[in-house]
Image (tube, rainbow, N blue to C red):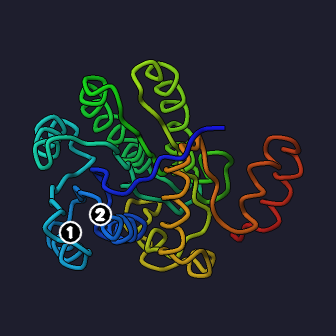
Amino acid sequence: MTKMERIDGKTIWITGASSGIGEALAYALSAKGCNLIISSRKKQELELVKSRCNDPDNVYVVPLDLNNPETMTQITSEAISAFGKIDILINNAGISQRSRIIDTDLEVYKKLMDINYLGTVAITKTVLPHFITQKTGHFVTVTSLMGKFGAPPRSGYCGSKHALHGFFDVLRMEHEKDGIKVTLICPGFVDTNIARNALTGDGSEQGTDDIENKNGLPVALFAKKMISAIERKKFEAYMGGKEVMGVYLKRFFPKLLHRFVQKNTQG
């Protein structure tokens, strides 16, 4: 059994920290005495999150946009210099999608892959040499249950999250010898704005919440469960309600999952 390693006092970089899961993680980790680097596209919102943390003096704001991979080297250097090191990178930033395949522009699929997959790969690759040099490090990537099985109308989102699983499984294998750990966090329905900000077929935002998300896990509870999975160095952690069963149905009874999703998907 893998020995649990407490997260208290670690230096942690969180992307997508201006709202939702990332914001909740910032509050929970600040309460544990962690040094935090928090990032997203929205500097004003990040400053507000910083001010609400348990110890704002140990929170450093670094704005970034995953859609601009050419900036990652410079931003990573700034993030490392904030506290002299990074122990854990939490890849949480990303966008979702709600549109049928027939109605979805190719540019929307490209944007989803550029941000969710290639942007995450870019920041990971810039942090990787730092982890190798210090002979320790932990990549924690928030994917989705949709990274394990698919459901309409999220084809592009599912594709980008499936891609993350392939990449980080290989990273774990290649760099275990360097003391590097990888944890994939797979949320089900969590009460965040992810559906409201989701892209529709023409690239515009959906602008409304999904009832499943509004009835999902409270974000503070999700953050607590996620921190526990990180401390236990889980390879993968599935978190949500009954939707988690989809992972096991996909593995053992894929046709049953197909029928269940078809029956319970509207539109």
- Residue 39, visible in the rendered structure: no
Q: Residues within 10 Å of mark 2 (few under 14, many from 20)?
A: some
Q: Amino acid at mark 1?
A: Leu
> Residue at point 24% right, 32% down?
126
Q: Secondary structure at mark 1?
A: helix
Give the Cα separation between the discs numbered 2 and 1: 19 Å
Residue 256 screen position, x and y as percent: 89, 51
- Residue 153, visible in the rendered structure: yes
Describe residue 9's horizontal placement relative to residue 187 as left or right: left
Which quadrant would residue 267 be assigned to in this image?
Answer: bottom right
Say which of 214 and 82 sits in front: 82
Residue 153: give its label. Answer: none
Residue 33: give its label. Answer: 2
Describe residue 93's horizontal placement relative to residue 77 as left or right: right
Which quadrant does the N terminus fall into? top right
> Residue at point 47% right, 59% down?
96
Say which of 167 and 176 sits in front: 176
Q: Residues within 10 Å of mark 1 (few under 14, many from 20)?
A: many
Say which of 231 and 205 sits in front: 231
Q: Which residue is mark 1?
A: 46
Which quadrant would residue 44 be assigned to in this image?
Answer: bottom left
Residue 19 in the image: above or below residue 69: below
> Residue at point 43% right, 21% down?
175
Q: Amino acid at mark 2?
A: Gly
> Residue at point 43% right, 66% down?
21
Residue 25 screen position, x and y as percent: 39, 65
Q: Secondary structure at mark 2?
A: loop
Which quadrant would residue 54 be assigned to in this image?
Answer: bottom left
